[in-house]
Amino acid sequence: MKILYLVPGPMSRGEMGRKEVERRREVLQSMAFPGTEVSIRDVADGPPSIESAYDELMAVPATLDGIMQAEKDGFDAVIIGCFGDPGLEAARELVSIPVIGPGESSLLLAAGLGHRFSVVTILDNVIASQEHQAHKAGVLDKLASVEAIGIPVLDLMRDRERTLQGVIEAGRRAIEQRRADTLMLGCMTLSFMGIGAEASNVLGVPVLEANAVALKAAEAQVSIGISHSPLAFPRPPKLPVPNTPEVVS
Amino acid sequence: MKILYLVPGPMSRGEMGRKEVERRREVLQSMAFPGTEVSIRDVADGPPSIESAYDELMAVPATLDGIMQAEKDGFDAVIIGCFGDPGLEAARELVSIPVIGPGESSLLLAAGLGHRFSVVTILDNVIASQEHQAHKAGVLDKLASVEAIGIPVLDLMRDRERTLQGVIEAGRRAIEQRRADTLMLGCMTLSFMGIGAEASNVLGVPVLEANAVALKAAEAQVSIGISHSPLAFPRPPKLPVPNTPEVVS
Amino acid sequence: MKILYLVPGPMSRGEMGRKEVERRREVLQSMAFPGTEVSIRDVADGPPSIESAYDELMAVPATLDGIMQAEKDGFDAVIIGCFGDPGLEAARELVSIPVIGPGESSLLLAAGLGHRFSVVTILDNVIASQEHQAHKAGVLDKLASVEAIGIPVLDLMRDRERTLQGVIEAGRRAIEQRRADTLMLGCMTLSFMGIGAEASNVLGVPVLEANAVALKAAEAQVSIGISHSPLAFPRPPKLPVPNTPEVVS
Amino acid sequence: MKILYLVPGPMSRGEMGRKEVERRREVLQSMAFPGTEVSIRDVADGPPSIESAYDELMAVPATLDGIMQAEKDGFDAVIIGCFGDPGLEAARELVSIPVIGPGESSLLLAAGLGHRFSVVTILDNVIASQEHQAHKAGVLDKLASVEAIGIPVLDLMRDRERTLQGVIEAGRRAIEQRRADTLMLGCMTLSFMGIGAEASNVLGVPVLEANAVALKAAEAQVSIGISHSPLAFPRPPKLPVPNTPEVVS
Amino acid sequence: MKILYLVPGPMSRGEMGRKEVERRREVLQSMAFPGTEVSIRDVADGPPSIESAYDELMAVPATLDGIMQAEKDGFDAVIIGCFGDPGLEAARELVSIPVIGPGESSLLLAAGLGHRFSVVTILDNVIASQEHQAHKAGVLDKLASVEAIGIPVLDLMRDRERTLQGVIEAGRRAIEQRRADTLMLGCMTLSFMGIGAEASNVLGVPVLEANAVALKAAEAQVSIGISHSPLAFPRPPKLPVPNTPEVVS
Amino acid sequence: MKILYLVPGPMSRGEMGRKEVERRREVLQSMAFPGTEVSIRDVADGPPSIESAYDELMAVPATLDGIMQAEKDGFDAVIIGCFGDPGLEAARELVSIPVIGPGESSLLLAAGLGHRFSVVTILDNVIASQEHQAHKAGVLDKLASVEAIGIPVLDLMRDRERTLQGVIEAGRRAIEQRRADTLMLGCMTLSFMGIGAEASNVLGVPVLEANAVALKAAEAQVSIGISHSPLAFPRPPKLPVPNTPEVVS
C-alpha cells in the first residue's frame, strides 16, 4: 500500500529543510509493515510551525489541497503531519481514502492502554485545543491532563537532552499529580526525536510517539478496507461530484 | 510476529467444532500483514457461547490461564476471542504482552471514523454490558446505541441470509433513529461470517468486523513495541513475581 | 460605540450582492441601542456560503485578516457574520477587542431561557459541527437537538414562506420529539429573514435570531468593558507584539 | 425601558440601610444604556443576607411577591438582586417579563470568554449550591472551581482592602491551581464594591461583576423582545390565569 | 425509634382532611420494622398540593419550622412528605437528625435495581425539576425519563382505576421507548394509593412507592447511627448555635 | 426474614479462620432489626482475599454457585461479602431474591448524605475498579476520590491502630484535597473492624461501614418486597428455567 505523510507547512523551505523532511520519511518507512511504501510531501504555504489556533487554521487551505491531490495521485491513505490534526473533518469531506490525524489516533490508542492518559505537549497555548481534540475523538473522560514542556517547536531539536528532560518532568507531573498511567507526545517534531522509549523506561509507563501511531492507524485501515464514514463527513454541497464516486466500506 | 487468538470457550468440542476453529484461524491469517503468524487456541472449560454476564464471568478463569500460557509460549500478543472482552483487565494484570479485546478495539477504531457509532449485537441480554464496555473504553460519548438482532450466537451461522438481514435492519434502525454514522458487529461469530462488506454496501456506512480490527490492533502494538500500562494494570499482590520482569515501553 | 459586522465571505460580489450587505447593516442598526454605530464589511476571498467544514475552514484566513484590520480601524467589537463562528478562537488570539460568535452567543443566551434548546439549521451537513459548537460553548448538556430544514443557504431567501414553514416544522419536531423548549435559528441568512417572531408565535416558544443576539452580546461586552480572557486565548508566539498592548479587563 | 432591581431581603431596614439601596440604584443607572431607567426595591421580609440554603429559601416568598408586583407595575424586566438567584424558576412560572438571575447571567457570559471560569464567593457554605447553579445554567463543564474568601456578606464593605485582597488571592488560587482563565464575583455586595477592574488588572483575566452583567442581560432581552420559555416555565396549575396573557416571543 | 412523617402542606385542613393524614400514618406504621413508631404531622401554612416550582418554594418556610420542631421533640428522623423534597438541603443545615427526601431516596434505591429508571409523575410541570433532583442525587446518568400521567395531585384519588391505568401507560412508555427497566412513583399521593404492586405485576419491572422507600431509608440511617454530613450541610452562619451540638457520625 | 452473608472466598479455611467468619455473623446479627436472622457462609474455592481484578474474577464462579444455593435454601436476600461486589450482575441474572453488593449499596447511601464522597480503600490496585463501580452504580458524578491506605487485606487486623490511623489520614486527604464530605470504608475486612465511628469522630464526617449498609439494604428490599429488575438482569438464555418462576415486584 502507498501512504502519504503530508506536512501541513513549508518545512522543506524552512529552518528544518528538505533533509529533515527526508529523514522523517525514512523514520516512517523503517516502522512500516512489509509492503507499505511511505511517501512524504510538505505544502507550499502556511506557518513554519503550528503553536496556536491561528497557526493551525492558517495551515488548513494548503493542506486540504495536498490531501485532495494525494487521493488523485493514488495514495491509499494520507496522514496529516501535525498532532493538532488541522483540517481533519474538512479533509474527510473531500476524499474517501482514510485521512489519519496523529492526534486523534494517539488519543484512541492510549484509551486502550490504561485508565487515564496525559498528553505531553510543547506550549501552554495549545492545551485548550488539545483538550478539545480529546472531546472530538470521544475520549475526554480518560484525559488526565495536557502538560506543556514550555519549548517551542522550532527549538525542540536544538537540545535533545533538554527536550527529553522536559518530557520526563512533564510526564512525571502527569503521573504523580493527575494519576495518568499512559502518555503520548503531543507534537510531531517531538514524536520524531526518538525519545519515547527513553522516557518510557524512566517513567515506567507507555509513551506513545504520534508518528508511529498514525502510520499504524493508516496501515490498519487500508489493510481491512475501512475508511471514515461518508455519512459523518458528507461531501460539501458546493463541490463538483468526483469522477469516480465509490462506496466506502 | 506471533499472535494468538484465544477462544474463551470450548469451541472445538462444541457444536461448531475444530473445523470452525481452524477456519477462523485461516480467516485471520488471510487478513494479516506479511510476517504475522496467527495461531488459534480455545480453552478446555466454560460456556459454549457468551450471551449473558453469567456466561462471560464463567469463561474467565480458563481464559486467564490461556493468556498466561500464551505469554510463556512466546506469543507477542494475544486476542481474547469474544467481543465482550471477558477478563481483559485481569489478563493485563497478569502478562506484559498486549492483550487485545476485540470489543475495546472496535469501539476505539469506530470513534475515529465518525461522530456516533452503534454496535449491532445478538441479544438484548448483552446491551447493558456493551454500554459498560463503551464506558470502560472511554468512548461512551460517541455510542449512539446498541442494537440487537435477536438471534443467539449458536444460530447465527445456520442461516447466513437471515443473519445478514438482521444486521442490515438493526443497522438501519441505528442510522435512522439514533443518528449512528458508523457500525460494528458486536459478536465474534457475527464478525467471522464475512457479512460486513455486504452490510456496508447496503447501508452506506463503515461496518467494522471485530476480528479484523482486533488483529490490526495486535499487529500495531507489537510493531511499535507498545503494550498496556503496568501502572494501570499492576501485577496482583498475591501472584509470584515472574522470572523475567521486563519494563514495558 | 462602533461595532463591525464582518461577513466571512465575498457576499457583496456574489448572488446576494452589495444590496443585501447594506440591508443587513440596516437591520442591525435598527436593533442597536442608542449610541451604537454598526458598520458592515465582507471579505474579498472565500466560499460564497458556509455549509460544510470545508467551507468554514476556507473562510478563515480572510476573516482573520478582517478582524485584525477591524481592531486597527478602531472598532470596539467585531461580530463574525456566520453562525458557525469560523475562526473564533484564532481571532481572539489576535485581537483584544471582543470578537462575538453569533453561534456561541445564541447558545449561551438560550441556555438561560429554558431547560433544553434546539438549533434549527439549514442542512444535515452542519449538524455535527454545531453539536461541537455547543460543546465548545460549554452548554452541550442543554442541547436537545440540531434540526435541519434541508434548504441550502443561497436558496433560503428565494421562497420566504417555504423557509418559514421549514423552520416551523423543524421547530415542532424539536419540541415534540426532543423536548426542546427554546429554539434558535442556526444560520445568519435565516436570522436576517425576519421570521423569528412568526415562528415563535406559532410554536409558543422563544425563537432566537442570531444576528440580534450577537449584536446585544457585542454591545454588552463593550458597555461593561469586558472582553475574552487573554489567558484563554494567548497571543500566538510567532506574531509580532502589537504596538499598544493593553491589559484586557 | 424600565428595569427593576429587586433586593430579596429587607436591606433598607438593615445595617446597610436605605442609603446603600439608593447607591446601588445609582451604580446600575450609571452603567445602563441610554433609554434604560433603573428602579430598585427591596422586600419587607426575609433574612438580612443570603449565606446558606436556609437563607436562600426563606428569602423566596417575599421575592416572588415582589416580582409579580413588578410585572403589574409595568416593568419590562426584573433582576433578582442576589447571586444565588433565589426563586428564579418559580418567578419565571409567574410572570412573562424577563426575570434575570445575576448568577445565571454571569455563568453564561463567562462561558463565552474563555475555557474555564471560577466563581469567587464569600463563604464555603455556598460552594455546593453555586456548583448546582452552574449545572442548572448548563455550563458545569466549564466551571473550574468556586473559591471562597471567607468573609461574611455583612463584613465585606467594612474593609475594602481586605476584601479586595481576598478576591485576588482566591482568584490567583483559581488560576494557578484550577486553570481558571476567567473569574466572576459570586455575591452582589461584592459586585457592587467596584473592585472588579482592580482585581482584573492584577490577575490579568476578566473579572465579572454580577450586577453589570445582570443589567446587560436584562437590557438585551428587553431590547430584542425575548423572554424565558413559557414551555420551560409553565404557569402553575393552581394560580388564576392573568388578565392579559400575551405570547412571549 | 421514632420517625416523623411531615406533610409540607395543610393537608388536614384541606380537601383530603385529617382522615387521610391519619390513614397515611397507618400505612407507614404497617410497613415499619418492629420497634419503629411512626408519627405524622402537617404544617399550618402553604399550598394545598405541590405541582410547580412555585408551590414547592412556598411550602418551604413552614416545613423547615416543622423539621426543627421535630428534632426538638426528640424524633430520630424526619421524612419530608413530598416527592420533590422541598427544603431538603436547608433542613439538613438546620438539624442533625436524618432528614429523608422521598424523591432522593427513591432515586438512589432505583439506581441499585437496574441500569435505567424512569419516574412516573403527575404533570409535565414538574419534569424539569425532577430531572434536577436526579442530578442533585447524583444519579442523572441512570435516569431514562420522567413520564407524566397528566392528572393533578388532588384528582389522583378520585378515580383509582384511571390513575392506575395512567401509571401503567406511562410506565410502558418508559420501558418501550426509553429503555427504562425500573420505575418509581414520583408523587406521595400516588405512592400512598397502593397501586405499585399492581403496576409492577402488569409491567414486569419493580415499581417503587416513595413512602415505603423513604421509611426504610429513615429506619436504616437511624439503625446504623448515620446522618447527613455536617461538612456538606453546615449550620447557617446567622442561626444561634443549638444547645447540644453533637458530632454526627 | 432470613439473610445470608456470603463470603466470596474460603475464609474459614484460611488465616482468618472459622472464628472470624462466626464473629462477622455476630456483628451483623447485632446490627439487624428485630425479626432478621443473619446466616453466614463462605465458599470452598477462590483467592484468600480480593485485591486485584484477577482475584475478583477468580472468586466469581464459586460465589455464583453459593448465591443460587442461597435462593434454593429459602433465604430472602443474599449479601456478597466483598466491597468489589464480585459477580453482582451475573448473580442477579440467576436469582430473583435481592442480591446486595456492599460497594454499590454504600455508594448509593453516601450519595444521599452529602455532595461528594470518597472511598477509603486498601491498595492502589483497586482504585480504577472502584471508580468503575461508581460508574455502574450511577453515582460517578459524586465520587470525589478513592484513597488507598496501602495495607493489604490480610494485614488489616494485625494492627488495629495502624489501620485506623491509615483510614484517618486517607480520609483527611479526601476531605482537604478532594473536597469529600462523606466517606466509606471500601473493604469488608476494614468495615468489620469497628473503626468507623472513631474515624468519624476525628474527621467530623460520616464514615460508612459497608457491612452495616449492606445489611440495611437487604432488610429494606425484603421488607418492602422489592428486588432487582428482571428486565435489567434477564435470565441467561442457556440456563434451565427454574421450577417456580415468580414475578418480581
Image (tube, coloured by chain):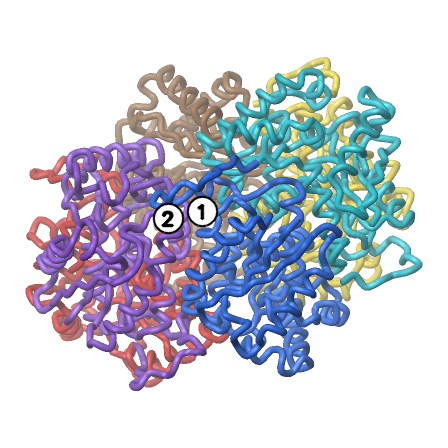
Chain colours: A cyan, B blue, C yellow, D brown, E red, F purple
- Give the CA distance from mark 2 to mark 1: 8 Å
**D242 and B196: which is toward the camera:** B196
- Indicate the amino acid at tag 2: Ser
Asked if B151 appears above or below E180 in the picture, the reply is: below
**B170 and B82: which is toward the camera:** B82
Q: Identify residue for label 1.
A: B93
Asked if A53 appears above or below C127 in the picture, the reply is: above
- Indicate the amino acid at tag 1: Glu
Q: Is residue C83 visible?
A: yes
The number of numbered discs placed on residues in the rendered structure image is 2
SS label for mark 2 = loop
SS label for mark 1 = helix
Residue at 54%, 30% (x, y): give it.
A201
Q: Is residue F178 left or right of residue B48?
A: left
Query: Badges 2 and 1: C-beta atoms under 8 Å apart?
Result: yes
Q: Is residue E81 visible?
A: no
Asked if C174 appears above or below E248 in the picture, the reply is: below
What x and y, as percent, mark residue D34? 59, 33
**C61 and F51: which is toward the camera:** F51
Q: Quadrant of the C terminus of chain D?
A: bottom right
What x and y, as percent, mark residue E223? 13, 56
Q: Identify residue for label 2.
A: F52
**Quarter occupied by residue C241:** top right
Q: Is residue D240 left or right of residue B249?
A: left
Residue at 35%, 65% (x, y): give it.
F61
Residue at mark 1: chain: B
**Quarter occupied by residue F97:** bottom left
